[in-house]
Amino acid sequence: MKVLLTSTSLLPDYGGPAFSVSRLAMALADAGVQVGLWTANGSAATTTLLPATSTVERLTGTESEALDRFRGTDVLHDNGIWLPHNHRLATLAERRDLPRVVSTRGMLEPWARSHKRLKKDVAWWLYQRRDLQLARRLITSSATETENVQRLKLGVSVAMVPNGVDVAEERPARVVVQTGNGAGSVRTALFLGRIYPIRACPC
């Protein structure tokens, strides 16, 4: 099977999708799938998130050129919505009768849609709704996201596929700290970050 993964960027500072799409590409390749990887900003060719030894094929050029180079694509898996390249990929997939799945990446969540609402409302009625309706399947990463996508009644099946997590084979050893009297004790370090109801969205 040949799968073409597409995304906006694979630069580390782009955030979560850069890491999760890179890891997905490597996991598919390790499972024996022929994987092509294309990004709108060309970073598929230079990203440090993909090892140089990986069998994933890094593609550059336009969306059409990437599809021409990665001949015989069985599935186009686009990550993200709203942007011009997402619409071009939807159009290409329709013209070439190519099955397309879309990972919405939280970009249809109510809080995400309220960001730049006017632009998104216009895009929704001009092309975005139809682009999603033409997909073979929509992929979400949580139960809440699944429910919110289903409320839009797009007529497309939705699959919840949480992002994979790399788990260390061995747990790190516990650190014993020597106290002033020479006795050893186990200390616990607590990290506290800001608790915020939503994460940053690159859409």
Image (cartoon, helix red, strand yellow):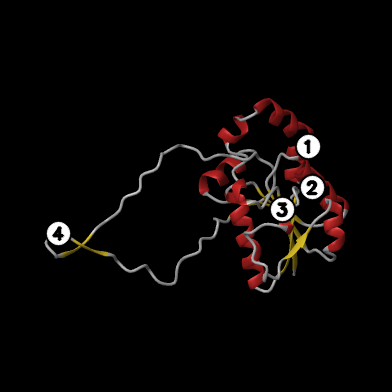
Residue tagged 1: 127
Residue farthest top in this picture: 118
Distance, label 4 to label 2, CA atoms, is 66 Å
Distance, label 1 to label 3, CA atoms, is 26 Å
Q: Quick one: 162 or 24, which is closer to the camera? A: 24
User: From the viewer's perspective, is residue 127 above or below residue 42?
Assistant: above
Nearer to us of marks 4 and 2 is 4
Residue tagged 4: 180
Please say whether residue 159 is visible from this viewpoint. Answer: no
Where's the C terminus, which quadrant? top right
For badge 4, the amino acid type reads: Gly
Measured as percent of width and height from the top left, residue 176 is found at 24, 65
Report which quarter residue 34 is drawn in: bottom right
Q: Quick one: 51 or 122, which is closer to the camera? A: 51
Q: Residue at x 46, y 65 (%)?
A: 167
Residue tagged 3: 43
User: From the viewer's perspective, is residue 166 above or below residue 127?
Assistant: below
In the image, is 127 to the left or to the right of 109? Answer: right
Residue tagged 2: 90
In the image, is 108 to the left or to the right of 135? Answer: left
- In the rendered structure, are the residues bearing label 1 and label 4 in contact, judged by CB atoms less than 8 Å apart? no
- Element class at badge 3: helix
